[in-house]
């Protein structure tokens, strides 16, 4: 999988910490803190997972949608492009990319059921699909760490409890930045190391056999540990609306708002 990944164009989708720090510049000027932005990212990734579960979609579909969502906001701001519409459009695109086709009307109905205050319709969803395709440079291929995780678990020979923790950490990793920063095999290995540590399993000898940058693996472990410490719960829908409505109102009334293009 690692060889296929590096041979593909997908490896060019990795970003640096500096690029992440530069994202959401307008949102931060309008009063959102980095903590607010992270809370909103976690909220919408959780919403994607919840909507996908309601629709009985595969985990891989939800994972791809979360990557689309995070990549879309590397070059956009919440004040210009409403994430309450974007997260649903990302799931719609992921359904197509992962061959789990779903009618836009059906998805819109379920989005409204999940979030009764969801104020968009099918036309809005289809329009946002086109915007996202352009912002993603029509690149919908996502190399997921799931296959790597299966191979690592089989090779390391860990017990069932540790394996379950590793899968759980991998699912949670999509609420963090690690899948934007590191290749999929490194993310999978970091999740396994985190699970092994929590389970009291020593992987040190096994890790020495691997041709992998252990500093990157340690960085994934640290990033996920921080996620668990700082975001043990997802903010409420009301708090999400409060933050987004506040930044949108400031955008519309500020000097950057009038005459500027708010995409939705």
Image (cartoon, rainbow, N blue to C red):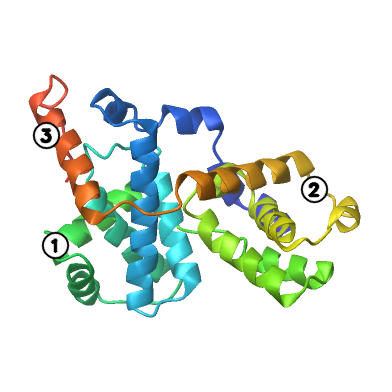
- Mark 3 sits on what residue? 249
Give the spatial CA distance, label 2 vs label 3: 47 Å
- Whole-percent x, y for residue 53 in the image: 38, 75
Vertical placement of residue 165 versus 80, above or below: below
Foreground mark, 1 or 2? Answer: 2
- Whole-percent x, y for residue 246 in the image: 16, 36
- Callout 3: helix, strand or loop? helix
Vertical placement of residue 106 versus 250, above or below: below
Name the one closer to the observer, 250 or 77: 250
Give the spatial CA distance, label 1 vs label 3: 24 Å
Residue at 10 percent across and 30 percent down: it is 252
Foreground mark, 1 or 3? Answer: 3
- Mark 1 sits on what residue? 123
Name the one closer to the observer, 178 or 10: 178
Residue at 63 percent across and 66 percent down: it is 165
Residue at 25 percent across and 76 percent down: it is 103
Would you call the spot at circle 3 few (<14 residues within 10 Å), some (14-19), or many (20 or more)? few
Vertical placement of residue 54 versus 25, above or below: below
For residue 106, side relative to residue 94 (left or right) = left
Quarter of the image with the N terminus in it: bottom right
Vertical placement of residue 180 versus 97, above or below: above
Q: Earlier in the sequence, mark 1 or mark 3?
A: 1
Give the spatial CA distance, label 1 vs label 2: 46 Å
- Callout 2: helix, strand or loop? loop
- Mark 2 sits on what residue? 212
């Amino acid at each position: 999988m690692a060889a296929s990944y590096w041979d593909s164009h997908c490896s060019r989708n990795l970003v640096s910490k500096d690029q992440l720090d530069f994202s959401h510049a307008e949102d931060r000027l309008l009063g959102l803190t980095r903590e607010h932005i992270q809370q909103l990212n976690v909220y919408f990734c959780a919403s994607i997972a919840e909507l996908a579960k309601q629709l009985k979609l595969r985990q891989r579909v939800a994972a791809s949608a979360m990557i689309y969502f995070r990549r879309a906001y590397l070059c956009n701001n919440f004040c210009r492009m409403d994430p309450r519409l974007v997260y649903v459009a990302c799931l719609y695109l992921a359904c197509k990319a992962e061959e789990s086709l779903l009618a836009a009307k059906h998805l819109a109905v379920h989005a409204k059921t999940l979030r009764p205050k969801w104020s968009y319709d099918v036309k809005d969803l289809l329009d946002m699909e086109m915007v996202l395709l352009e912002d993603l440079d029509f690149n919908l291929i996502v190399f997921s760490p799931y296959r790597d995780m299966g191979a690592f678990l089989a090779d390391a020979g860990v017990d069932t409890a540790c394996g379950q923790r590793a899968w759980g950490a991998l699912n949670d990793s999509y609420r963090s930045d690690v899948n934007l920063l590191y290749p999929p095999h490194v993310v999978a290995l970091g999740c396994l190391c985190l699970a092994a540590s929590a389970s009291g399993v020593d992987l040190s000898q096994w890790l020495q056999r691997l041709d992998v940058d252990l500093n990157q693996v340690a960085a994934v472990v640290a990033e996920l540990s921080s996620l668990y410490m700082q975001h043990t719960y997802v903010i409420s829908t009301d708090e999400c609306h409060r933050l987004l409505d506040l930044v949108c109102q400031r955008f519309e009334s500020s000097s950057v708002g009038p005459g500027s293009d708010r995409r939705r």
